[in-house]
Amino acid sequence: MCQHQPPCPTADSADREAAHLVAHHPEQGWSLLCNGVLLFEDTGELLPNGQVIDPRRPLGTAHIMTAA
């Protein structure tokens, strides 16, 4: 799929997010990479084989609620 030199990382590589952007739709919350990976603004991913990578955005301390 990739025509870049050097080639972009494959969708199953650990560094798959380093691939070139093909389409970017921030209004819809997603981007498509050259290797076929769909990146979502919540940091989740959908790989070309249908595998879902759960979001991994860390929560800041301002988002942690404690019980009284």
Image: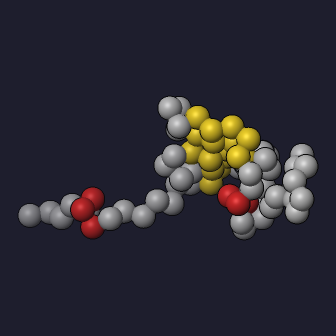
Could you tell me which residue is drawn at 54 percent across and 53 percent down? 43
Nearest the eye: 41 or 64? 41
Is residue 66 visible from the viewing direction of this image? yes
Could you tell me which residue is drawn at 24 percent across and 62 percent down? 62
Is residue 50 visible from the viewing direction of this image? no
Q: Is residue 38 left or right of residue 10?
A: left
Quarter occupied by the C terminus:
bottom left
Q: Position of residue 8 (x, y in %)?
A: 82, 58
Q: Is residue 52 left or right of residue 27?
A: right
Nearest the eye: 22 or 28? 22
Task: Please tell me whether residue 10 is drawn above or below residue 37 in the rendered image.
Answer: below
Task: Please tell me whether residue 31 is drawn above or below residue 9 in the rendered image.
Answer: above
Q: Position of residue 59 (x, y in %)?
A: 36, 62
Residue lying farthest top?
A: 27
Q: Position of residue 64 (x, y in %)?
A: 26, 63
Q: Position of residue 50 (x, y in %)?
A: 74, 44
Q: Is residue 6 left or right of residue 24?
A: right
Residue lying farthest left?
A: 68
Could you tell me which residue is drawn at 91 percent across and 49 percent down? 3
Q: Is residue 31 left or right of residue 65?
A: right
Nearest the eye: 2 or 66? 2
